[in-house]
Each structure stands twice: as structure tokens, then as C-alpha cells.
Image: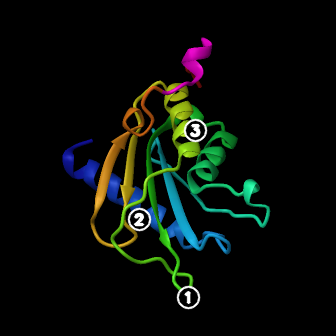
Amino acid sequence: MGCDGAVSAKRELIEAARAAMANAHAPYSRFAVGAAVRLTDGAIVTGCTFENASYGLSLCAETVALATVNAQGRFADVEAIAVVGGAMGADGSVAGDAIVTPCGRCRQIMNETEQMAGRELAIYCAAPEGDAVIEHCVAELLPFSFGPADLGITPRKN
């Protein structure tokens, strides 16, 4: 994929995360997050925050998206993830140019995904509005990680 295609694919992934963020169920934290996962064939799978009155049962957007990918049997096909989030206004919308990054739990799940996929994943953290984006790799987000390789588990081939 040429540079224009790569930029277009990144923009499409971020826009998918923004669209997913609009569906967040976040009545307790009032902090909505959307995530989008691009697979090797270009397909995009999304997820959003899914909170629960029993806080510990809440699910992060990244976890929802990656679990959906796994349910489709495509866990090894993940190549990039976009994350967008922010505080919800009184009308439930999210605005602003602040960039959020995945929580610790999601970083661990991304590490698992990367190791099982057998490729470095691009993680795009973008603002709810505007063009602000920071690209990370899993090693930057979770240095000194523990994952499948530490247990002698190698990537699966679909």
C-alpha cells in the first residue's frame, strides 16, 4: 500500500473508532471510548465502552473490538487498532482535541493480540475531533510485557 493508501486506511480506521464511540454505554464514568481494528484483508471491526452498574464487569472499547475479532476466528489477522475517547457532554456527545491512550488492561490484551498475530501492530490514538493522532507500538505502551511467548506459545496460523 502506497503512502496515500496508508494515510487513507489510517483515517478510515480512526473514523470507524469515532463512529463506534458514539455508541458507548458509559452512564457511570461519562467517559466514552471507541475502538476500531483493521484486519489484514482491510476489514474493520469496532467496539465501544460497555459499562455495568457493577463496575468490575465493564468492558473497554478495545477489549470489545478484539473479542469480536476473536469470535470471528480472525485474532491472528489483526494489523492495526485505533482508539478515540473523551468525557461525554450533557447530551452524550464527545468533543475536543485531547488524545487518550489504552488503559493497562487493554495494553495487555493488545500485547496478547500482537504476539498471537506474529506482527507488530500499529496503535493510533486520536482525538475525538480534528487531526491530532499519535501512533504507538505495543512495546511503547507496555514495556517489559508478559505474554504468550513467555509461556512457550507461538502464533497460530489460520
Q: Is residue 12 above or below residue 137?
A: below
Depth check: 123 or 157 in front?
Answer: 123
* Circles 2 and 3: CB atoms closer than 8 Å: no
Residue at x 66% of width, y 70% of height: 25
Q: CA distance from mark 1 to mark 2?
A: 20 Å
Q: CA distance from mark 1 to mark 3?
A: 31 Å
Q: Is residue 49 visible?
A: yes
| Bounds of the magenta segment | 145-152
Label 2 Cα crowd, 10 Å radius (few <14 / some 14-19 / many 20+): many
Amino acid under disc 3: Ile
Colour approach in the figure: rainbow
> What is the secondary structure assignment of the residue under circle 3?
helix
> What is the secondary structure assignment of the residue under circle 1?
loop
Residue named by callout 2: 15
82 is within the stretch colored magenta: no
Amino acid under disc 2: Glu
Residue named by callout 3: 109
Amino acid under disc 1: Asp
User: x, y percentage for residue 20?
Assistant: 54, 66
Q: CA distance from mark 2 to mark 3?
A: 22 Å
Q: Which numbered tag is attached to residue 91?
A: 1
> What is the secondary structure assignment of the residue under circle 2?
helix
16 horizontally vs 29: left or right: left
Q: Is residue 153 visible?
A: no
